[in-house]
């Protein structure tokens, strides 16, 4: 009896501690990431320069390095939330916008626009959303056979992912694209981004993240059996489409800026569920922090491990996410309790 009374308090304490630790680590990582690179400054000098505004080196970091840090944080949060929403919609723990082809479809649209219709450059984020939505509908239609089996859905998504990626690489190569242009969309490189890119991503992704937080109760209901949910008066199909649409917006907008980053939307939700549980009212805010931390950590490692050369954050995530994906496939046939 005492154990039943104290469990909620301990659970609340665990969740609070998890939030505090990840937030503290994120702040420390931001400080560390700001001083990693060719400009040699200490964290103390960085903080003094931010306070006084009279340090040329710090001003350079603010103009060159801080946009990259901001983009990594926002994109990581957006991709992690997108993966969480898609796993709720499809009731499949193996779902990730990068694995099932949504990100590669968005990247393909961005590549086609940049190569064939450069006049529409500023419309790339919105057009990428259309590409991601078309990919989602195509995956479901090809996997449908009187119902959708999780394994078949993943296999179809992987096949389309490879197809879209191959077409995007062919188009970028045929167009003579460089890493600073179209190729950055395909390769997942966030170097040489500006405050303009950061503002655009923050506006679009910020709105979609707020929408995702408002859908937390709906996500909890979608985790129920469809018959049970309909018995409670839930419009399952409509709500599933709304949640999926928000997830597609998040994945597509992020891809249009940072390129294809696989496994982040798979890795983060699973880690978060083990720490704070499956209630999306608690899970989604934690996923935002953890996703931002993981993306920034990957980018910082990529910049530091073989300086002056860089390893894209997408490559670091692939190295970490690949073994995790294989382990997940072997765990109870990919089943997971939500």
Image (spheres, rainbow, N blue to C red):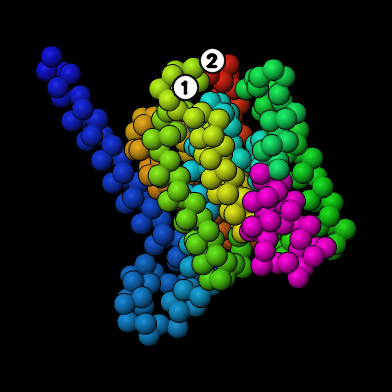
The residue drawn where x is 62% and y is 22% is 150
Residue farthest along the right direction in this orientation: 174
Name the residue rendered at 22%, 35% in the picture.
Answer: 13
Q: Is residue 151 above or below residue 199?
A: above
The mark that comes first in sequence, 1 or 2, is: 1
Disc 2: which residue: 332
> 97 and 291: which one is in front?
97
- Indicate which disc residue 265 carries: none
Give 94 or 327, whichever is nearer the viewer.
94
In this rendering, position of residue 17 left or right of residue 134: left
Which residue sits at x=48%, y=43%?
Answer: 81
Instruction: Residue 219 in the image: state x and y as whole percent.
Output: 44, 33
Answer whether labels 1 and 2 touch (C-beta < 8 Å): no
Return the residue at label 1: 230
Q: CA distance from mark 1 to mark 2?
A: 28 Å
Residue extending farthest left: 2
Q: Image quadrant of residue 278?
A: top left
For disc 2, the neighbor class at 10 Å (few under 14, some 14 to 19, many from 20) is few
Q: Can I make out residue 321 in this image?
A: no
Residue 143 among those drawn in magenta:
no
Q: Quadrant of the C terminus?
A: top left
Query: Looking at the picture, does residue 22 appear above or below residue 41?
Result: above
Secondary structure under the numbered disc 2 in the rendered image: helix
User: Which of the 4 image quarters holds residue 101?
Assistant: top right
Can residue 126 be seen by looking at this rendering? yes
Q: Pinpoint residue 52: horizontal percent, then vertical percent.
A: 32, 82
SS majority, magenta: helix
Mark toward the viewer: 1 or 2? 1
Q: Which residues are magenta?
A: 104-133
């Amino acid at each position: 009896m005492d154990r039943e009374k104290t469990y909620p308090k301990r659970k609340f304490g665990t969740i609070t501690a998890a939030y505090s630790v990840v937030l503290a680590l994120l702040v420390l990582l931001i400080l560390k990431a700001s001083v990693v690179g060719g400009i040699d400054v200490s964290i103390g000098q960085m903080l003094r320069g931010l306070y006084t505004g009279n340090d040329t080196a710090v001003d350079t970091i603010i103009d060159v390095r801080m946009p990259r840090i901001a983009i990594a944080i926002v994109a990581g949060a957006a991709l992690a939330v997108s993966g969480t929403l898609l796993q709720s919609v499809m009731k499949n723990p193996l779902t990730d916008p990068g694995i099932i082809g949504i990100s590669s479809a968005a990247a393909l649209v961005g590549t086609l626009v940049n190569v064939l219709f450069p006049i529409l450059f500023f419309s790339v984020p919105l057009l990428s959303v259309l590409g991601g939505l078309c990919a989602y509908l195509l995956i479901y239609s090809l996997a449908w056979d009187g119902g959708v089996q999780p394994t078949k859905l993943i296999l179809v998504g992987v096949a389309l992912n490879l197809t879209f990626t191959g077409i995007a690489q062919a188009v970028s190569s045929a167009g003579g694209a460089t890493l600073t242009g179209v190729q950055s969309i395909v390769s997942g490189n966030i170097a040489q981004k500006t405050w303009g890119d950061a503002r655009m991503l923050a506006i679009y992704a910020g709105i979609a993240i707020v929408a995702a937080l408002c859908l937390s109760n709906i996500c909890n209901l979608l985790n129920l059996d469809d018959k049970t949910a309909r018995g409670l008066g839930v419009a399952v199909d409509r709500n599933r489409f709304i949640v999926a649409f928000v997830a597609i917006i998040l994945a597509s907008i992020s891809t249009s800026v940072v390129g294809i980053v696989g496994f982040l939307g798979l890795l983060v939700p699973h880690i978060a569920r083990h720490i704070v549980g499956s209630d999306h009212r608690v899970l989604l805010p934690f996923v935002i922090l953890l996703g931002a931390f993981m993306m920034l950590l990957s980018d910082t490692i990529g910049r530091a491990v073989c300086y002056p050369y860089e390893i894209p954050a997408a490559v670091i995530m692939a190295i970490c996410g690949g073994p995790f994906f294989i382990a997940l496939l072997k765990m109870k046939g990919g089943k997971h309790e939500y």
